[in-house]
Image (cartoon, rainbow, N blue to C red):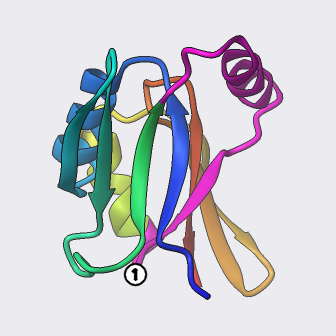
Amino acid sequence: MKIVVTSIFVQDQDKALEFYTETLGFVKKHDVPSGEFRWITLVSPDDQDGTELLLEPNDHPAAKEYQQKLFADGIPVTMFGVADIHKEYKELVEKGVKFTMEPTEMGEVTIAVFDDTCGNLIQIIEQ
């Protein structure tokens, strides 16, 4: 068994698609109408057959509450791995990304947390 798709709730699918592709560099794999919303998945440019990230609309009241409470408490919804966290941090700051935690050593790993502009905090990690 392996993880094929994982999802994050987003407030606006178009805004999320733009941020995750243009700012973070993910590649759109699927963009299919699904009722009033779309099935939008993204993949890493280095692993286009790997795990897909679904940009899930937070239309359900429970999804909105879940997303808002995690954000308010400073809890990241997911984690992305990077090869060089200091380089990634610098590049993202230059693109206007707002970080809530600068690169910080935590034992054998270094992490940072940023706001994805779509209602989520995202953690990046260098191992």
Q: Position of residue 57 (x, y in %)?
A: 47, 25
Q: Position of residue 3 (x, y in %)?
A: 55, 75
* Disc 1 residue type (three-letter): Ala
Image: 45 above or below 33: below
Q: Which residue lies under the disc numbered 1? A: 83
Nearest the viewer among 31 and 80 is 31
Q: Is 59 within the magenta?
A: yes
Quarter of the C terminus within the rendering: bottom right
Q: Position of residue 28 (x, y in %)?
A: 18, 52
Q: Residues within 10 Å of mark 1 (few under 14, many from 20)?
A: few
Q: Residue at (32%, 51%) from the top-left corner?
A: 41
Quarter of the N terminus within the rendering: bottom right
Q: Residue at (61%, 54%) from the top-left corner?
A: 78
**Left-right relation of 43 to 89:** left
Q: Residue at (60%, 38%) from the top-left corner?
A: 121
Nearest the viewer among 62 and 95 is 62
Q: Position of residue 100 (x, y in %)?
A: 62, 36
Q: Residue at (77%, 31%) from the top-left corner?
A: 70
Q: Under tag 1, what secondary structure?
A: loop
Q: Is 29 within the magenta?
A: no
Magenta part of the protein: which range?
A: 57-85
Q: Quadrant of residue 74?
A: top right
